[in-house]
Image (tube, rainbow, N blue to C red):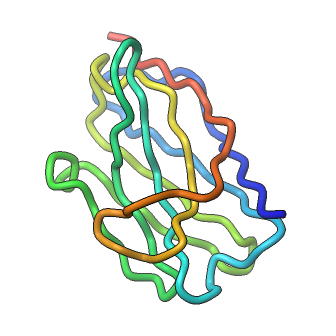
């Protein structure tokens, strides 16, 4: 059973960089051909895919967030991370990490999700 767990600060100030980490257990982030994504849901809105890192380290980003988003990984810890720069209160959302069965751009579906972590950006 694959499990994903998000971690990071729950409060970030405007103009700073939001940093979150997803720790994966029960499966390797380097296993072919999975993709590992960050998804967010602002209050009262739908899910928004932010970007992914594939099993081979290739990264894909949402065009609307590409200029501010960076996804990286630490294979020794089986973790992948999100950095979102120059945040504003509009970046307040619940942030999820998830696995997709294939490393497509963008992902077509997700088979495992973390529980999500709430991040609030203060003005």
Quarter of the image where the C terminus is located: top left
Q: Residue at x 34, y 20 (%)?
A: 45
Between residue 31 and residue 13, name the one nearer to us. 31
Residue 15, x across and y down, in percent: 28, 29
Residue 38, x across and y down, in percent: 46, 51
Q: Residue at x 73, y 62 (%)?
A: 24
In the image, residue 94 above or below residue 36: above
Residue 103, x across and y down, in percent: 43, 76
Q: Residue at x 38, y 62 (%)?
A: 108
Between residue 72 and residue 62, name the one nearer to us. 62
Q: Quadrant of residue 22?
A: bottom right
Residue 30, x across and y down, in percent: 62, 84
Q: Quadrant of residue 66?
A: bottom left
Quarter of the image where the N terminus is located: bottom right
Between residue 84 and residue 111, name the one nearer to us. 111
In the image, residue 82 above or below residue 53: above
Between residue 75 and residue 44, name the one nearer to us. 44
Left or right: 7 in relation to 45? right
Left or right: 76 in relation to 117? right
Q: Which residue is drawn at 51% across and 36% down?
A: 95
* Total labels drawn: 0
In the image, residue 24 above or below residue 88: below
Left or right: 116 in relation to 19? right
């Amino acid at each position: 059973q694959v499990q994903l767990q998000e971690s990071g600060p729950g409060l970030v100030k405007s103009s700073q960089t939001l940093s979150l980490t997803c720790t994966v257990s029960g499966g390797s982030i380097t296993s072919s051909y999975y993709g590992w994504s960050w998804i967010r849901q602002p209050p009262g809105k739908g899910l928004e895919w932010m970007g992914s890192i594939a099993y081979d380290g290739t990264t894909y980003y949402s065009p609307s967030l590409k200029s501010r988003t960076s996804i990286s990984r630490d294979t020794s810890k089986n973790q992948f991370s999100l950095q979102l720069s120059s945040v504003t209160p509009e970046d307040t959302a619940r942030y999820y990490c998830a696995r997709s069965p294939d490393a497509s751009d963008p992902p077509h579906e997700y088979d495992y999700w973390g529980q999500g972590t709430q991040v609030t950006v203060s003005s």
